[in-house]
Amino acid sequence: MEPRIEHSCEKKLIGQRKTMSFANYSIALLWQGFMPRKNEIQNKSSEDLFSLVKYQPTHFTDFKPSNEFERWAAMEVSSFDQIPEGMESFVLPSGHYAVFSYQGLSTDNTIFKYIFETWLPNSGYELDDRPHFERLGKKYKNNDPNSEEEIWIPVKLLSTVR
């Protein structure tokens, strides 16, 4: 499975966030709080949902299941003029991403094992210190094996000097 490499411009997002770890993974609670309120967001650029993760710079180099990260449930907007109470704004910086088209259950983590253990080490790229995200569009169906989404992994060309 080969990704496309795409440059993404800066994006404005509005949503909710929660700090968690893989040992204490509470993504369902985040989405249960966000989904009933998503229609309160004004100036949406599309109906796509963003499941975004902001990792600490050492998250992958010193990986432990207890490492905390920030997970967001959000939508892209054209402006931050109106932010619903209890939601926050987030600016997703521009940069290059490896974009994987994925079909299957969101609970099946084998795609991430492939990305980080097979594709990335052989790609000529390395992780960039920017948020990772999944873009959940019209073909996304929660808990459905026919669900489709895009997985966006921040990358930069491998530096030749280490």
Image: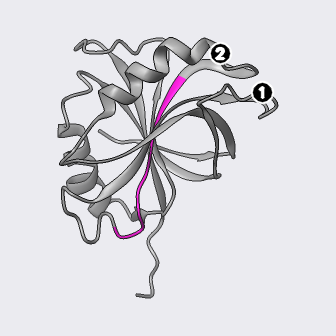
**Residue on which the image places disc 2:** 40
Viewer-nearest residue: 78 or 35 = 35
Q: Position of residue 155 (x, y in %)?
A: 47, 58
Answer with mark 1 or mark 2, whichever residue precedes in sequence: 2
Lateral position of residue 109 relative to residue 50, left or right? left
Residue 60 appears in which quarter of the rendering? Answer: bottom left
Q: Residues within 10 Å of mark 1 (few under 14, many from 20)?
A: few
Residue 106 appears in which quarter of the rendering? Answer: top left
Q: Secondary structure at mark 2?
A: helix
Residue 102 seen in render = no
Q: Are marks 1 and 2 in contact (CB under 8 Å)?
A: no
Residue drawn at the location 64% of the way across and 52% of the way down: 93
| Res 90 label | none
Locate the N terminus and report the quarter of the image it occupies: top left
* Residue 90 in the image: above or below residue 27: below
Q: Which amino acid, mark 1? A: Gln
Please report the bounds of the magenta region as a residue range: 49-58
Residue drawn at the location 25% of the way across and 21% of the way down: 104
Lateral position of residue 70 relative to residue 93, left or right? left
Residue 59 seen in render = yes
Viewer-nearest residue: 34 or 52 = 34
* Residue 120 in the image: above or below residue 135: below
Lateral position of residue 126 relative to residue 116, left or right? right
Q: Which amino acid, mark 2? A: Glu
Residue drawn at the location 49% of the way across and 51% of the way down: 131
Q: Position of residue 123 (x, y in %)?
A: 35, 59
Residue 125 appears in which quarter of the rendering? Answer: bottom left
**Residue on which the image places disc 1:** 82
Residue 63 lies in the magenta stretch = no
Q: Main secondary structure of the magenta part?
A: strand
